[in-house]
Structures are given as structure tokens and as C-alpha cells.
Image (cartoon, helix red, strand yellow):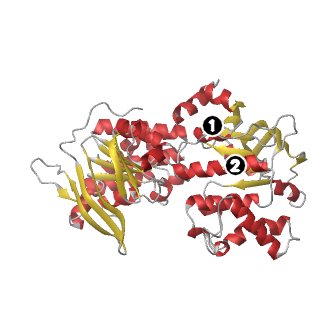
Amino acid sequence: MTPSSKEPDLATPLLEVENLRVAFSGKEVVHGIDFSIAPGEKLALVGESGSGKSITALSLLRLVHNARISGAARLASGEPGQAPINLLQAPERELLGIRGRDIAMIFQEPMTALNPVYTVGDQIAEVLQLKQGVSAREAWEGAVEALAATGIPEPARRAATYPHQLSGGQRQRAMIAMALACRPRLLLADEPTTALDVTLRQQILDLLSDLQRQNGMSVLLITHDLNLVRRFADRVAVMENGHLVEQGTVAGVFGQPQHAYTRRLIDSRPRRDVPPATEGQAPVMRASALRVSYPVPLPGFRGWFRRGAFVAVHGAEFSIPPGGTLGIVGESGSGKSTMALAALGLVPHEGKLEVVGQHWGNDVQGDRAIRKLVQVVFQDPFSSLSPRMTVEEIVGEGLLVHEPALDIDQRRARVFATLEEVGLSEGQFPGLLGRYPHEFSGGQRQRLAIARALIVQPKVLVLDEPTSALDVTIQQQVLRLLQRLQKERGLSYLLITHDVDVIRAMAHEVLVMKDGKVVESGSVEQVLNHPREAYTRTLVAAAA
């Protein structure tokens, strides 16, 4: 997808923002920024978490609570000859009419933005009834039409479903349908594809572009995904710590960035720096004819007497040598995470799965020695670390189970040494061991999670989307840490991800999974540079 060839008319902006400032309890977080959006233009607002992107967008509709907002945000009137409306000073009653009708918003996580107790059709119909005053029947028909416009199959049936009954991509399409139901003039899209797989990202991106062209709508895209910006936007504005440091056309800013922060963002693509895997030695993990299934009820009266089975992994085979990385890539539902659970000995499986020559026996006591050898780092470090435990308790917990003979001083010394190894020290963080996870940034919390896994000296780390919740520069730091640890410790990694760039940077071998089956495997160069299967080519193309 390429930016639209028709240049927007920048002389007559749809929205003009001047000297926008946002402060909480006297502390300013957005510092006097200026930008404009022309009719039909796609502007991307980029930067890392905490840069002020989302606060800026929410402030335009005065949706930020307990904030002091100043400056001007002038929206061109929809009526000829009428003066622009300053959104920051308009009465709340007037803003109620503008929200959803003239300016709509798509949020990052549709599962939390959609109401779980109402069907998606009811939620879209409610917008139409409130904003356009149509009857309940007309609103329902409009909701079905809005869903159909987003490409959801069987829109009438999907309208009657609840959010939890839809896939991630379908929920995002429902959110888009709700936002665009009243054909707004400006769409604020806050990280609309971050939680989606690469192919779904491309589908949502194509959908937004098509709907934008059809409706002549302007879009303010908030994101830290630079690949998405390249494909979608006409212009880009870069934010750092609440300041707008650079803006211009996508080609100009990406081709010749003027600000050091912009250059750092552009240079943050994962880089490959891994040693060759050890050859001629027995693999640290090996699977043969690996099959994982879950019981499911059968339809009709047959379900009274027996249960069926849903096969999540069909006969997978792989091996990981010492110091090697096996990357598993695929869309949601492909079986990646189930493969990770099997590798961790957390789900029953059929076939053979060995760790350093020992077979997982699905026995709590018997598998304890193997469990020490295989540790895991999860996708979201905030939810994987207990908020009630200190750093010392989190990192040292594994030693209580696997090395109970250590006394308190020995255990604390190991905790300190492991934290130093992942780049966290008492000098940086006074009182480090007594701190809690919420006192650290996302990247620092992921370092804590890595330290927790390393302290028991494993042979294999299962990395389940270890960087997808992080900004691009933090992602690069964590990948460099993992690369360094692999060199120093000879660790093997089972890397689960949908990010092809991360696979390129980290993996030696790759498995491509679809619908629980391995559809292609081989070296990273062979699979990603010369894919045989159409599905693999689609994944690689979507990440380019």
C-alpha cells in the first residue's frame, strides 16, 4: 500500500492545532505543539510510549480527565461560510455533537474498548441512533451495512455476536465500523494495528486506506510502527517527550531526517548479531511427531456420550542445537503458543519431546529437573510480573524451588549478579531489590523477566513475543541483550513471534505454522529470502 498520489490542499486545513499544551497537576506533558491536517490527508504522529502522542489526540476531543489544556485546535465548519470551531473552547454540548459525527476515534485494544455485554451490532446501532436520530430498525440496518463495508464475512450474523466471539482482526473491523458509521470528516486512529498479526495489519491498513478514499476522510494515525507509516501516511510528525521535533512529507522525513531522535527511530530496526549455532552436538531440545489436542464438545446428542478433539499442533518436528535459535512464525491461531506451552511441559502432548535427552513425562515431581532447564520470557512484562512482589522476590523465586540449599546471603548474591548481567544495578536504581515492577519502564520490566528466567541457569529460553509490547528503540535494546546473553552463556532460544524482522535478527532456523501445521521450515536465509509456500510469501511481504 502506498500513500495516496493526490496531494491534499494544505492551504485550507480541516484541523489546525496551535500551541497545544497539556498539563497534569502543574506538570506539562505536551509542550506547545503545532500541526495541521488538510481535507483528505493522512498524517502520522509517531514516537515512543510517553512521547505524548495519545494525549495529544485525546486532548483534541477533551477526553483527558484532570488535565489543563490550552492553545487552539480549530476544526473547519461543515457548513460553507461558517467560522472554524475551536475544540478546546467549545461548550461540552457542542462537543457531544462533534464526537462521533465529525471526529471519530479508533482505539488500540478493541477488546477493552468494546462493551462485552452488548453485541457489536447494538453498539454500532447506538452510535447511529444518538448521532443521526434514526429509528432502531434503520440503525440496525446501518450497523450491518457498516460491518459489510469493513469486509467482515456474514455481516448480519456477525452483528448479532459479542466481542469475545470475534477474532482480533474482526474486533478491530467492528471498531472501525463503529467509528466510521456516521462518516466523520476526521478519524483519530490510536495504534489501530499494534495488537494484530502482520497479515491482519496489512488488511486493516488497506481497509482504512480504501474507506478514507471513498469518504474523503482525513486521518490522524498515532503509531510507533514506522513500516506502517511508510505505507499509509502522506505526512509525518515526530514527537519526543511532549515536543514536536520534526514534521514533513514521509519521503522527506524518512529519506533525510533532520533531528537526532528521528534518526534514532529510523535506525531502530532489529539488527542481526548472533553467533553460528554449534554443530555436531546433540540438540538441547528435540520434537518428533509432536501433537497437542484439546477436548471439545461434539454437536447434538453425540456430545452427551463423548467429546471430540481440537488438534492445535499436528505432528511437528524440530530440533534446537546448543547456542541456536529456532524461530516459529505464523498468525494468531496457527499453533505457535501451543507449541511453546508444550516445550515448557505445560500441556499434555503426544509424540516425543526431549530436553537434553530427557522426555517430558507430564509428572510434577519427575519433571522438576527438566523444568529448571527450560524457562520462559512472556510477551507483556507488566502482566507477567507480580505487582505485590519485590524485585528480590521475583528474581530469586526460582532459586527457592530449584536450589533450596542456598541461604539468604547466597541467594541475594545470585540475584544481584543476575540483575547486573541484564543491565540493572544498585547504582542505577538505589534500593533495587526492594522496588516493585510498577517503578520500572517497559524495557526495564522485560529485563527483570529475563533475569528471573536466567537465575536458575537454564539451557533453553522460550521467548513468547518478547518484544512486541515494546517501542522500537526499547525492542532493539532487549534484542541486543538476548544476543549478548546467547554468546556469553551459549543459550538456546525457542522464539515465538509474528514479527519477521525479529526472526531475521535472531533465528538460525525457522518454522512457519498455519492452522496447527508446519507448512515450511529451514534456515532463516532460505525460508525468508526464498520462501516456497504462498503463505510464507504473504507473511514476508506483509512485513516488508
| Mark 2 residue element | helix
Q: Which residue is mark 2?
A: 484
Instruction: Judge from the rendering whether residue 227 lies leftward or rightward of residue 342; answer left or right.
Output: left
Q: Which residue is mark 1?
A: 504
Label 1, label 2: how many angstroms apart (C-alpha)?
16 Å
Instruction: Judge from the rendering whether residue 283 lies leftward or rightward of residue 174; answer left or right.
Output: right
Q: Locate residue 524, reporting x and y percent.
A: 67, 32
| Mark 1 residue element | helix
Residue flagged by tag 2: what amino acid is it?
A: Arg
Residue closer to the observer: 22 or 359: 22
Q: Locate residue 31, reporting x and y percent.
A: 33, 62
> Residue 364, relative to residue 261: is it above or below?
below
* Eye-nearest disc, 1 or 2: 2
Task: Identify the mark at residue 159; answer none if there is no mark.
Answer: none
Q: Quadrant of the N terminus?
A: top left
Residue 292 visible to an observer of this rendering = yes
Residue 465 visible to an observer of this rendering = no
Residue at point 55%, 42% (across, down): 197
Disc 2 crowd rating (10 Å Cα; few below 14, some 14-19, many 20+) is some
Quadrant housing residue 122: bottom left
Residue at point 88%, 39% (across, down): 282
> Residue 3, relative to residue 57: is it above or below?
above
Residue closer to the observer: 266 or 319: 266
Quadrant housing residue 394: bottom right
Quadrant housing residue 149: top left
Disc 1 crowd rating (10 Å Cα; few below 14, some 14-19, many 20+) is some
Residue flagged by tag 1: what amino acid is it?
A: Arg
Q: Locate residue 406, reporting x and y percent.
A: 86, 71
Residue closer to the observer: 95 or 446: 446
Q: Locate residue 78, reporting x and y percent.
A: 17, 49
> Residue 382, relative to residue 320: is it above or below?
below
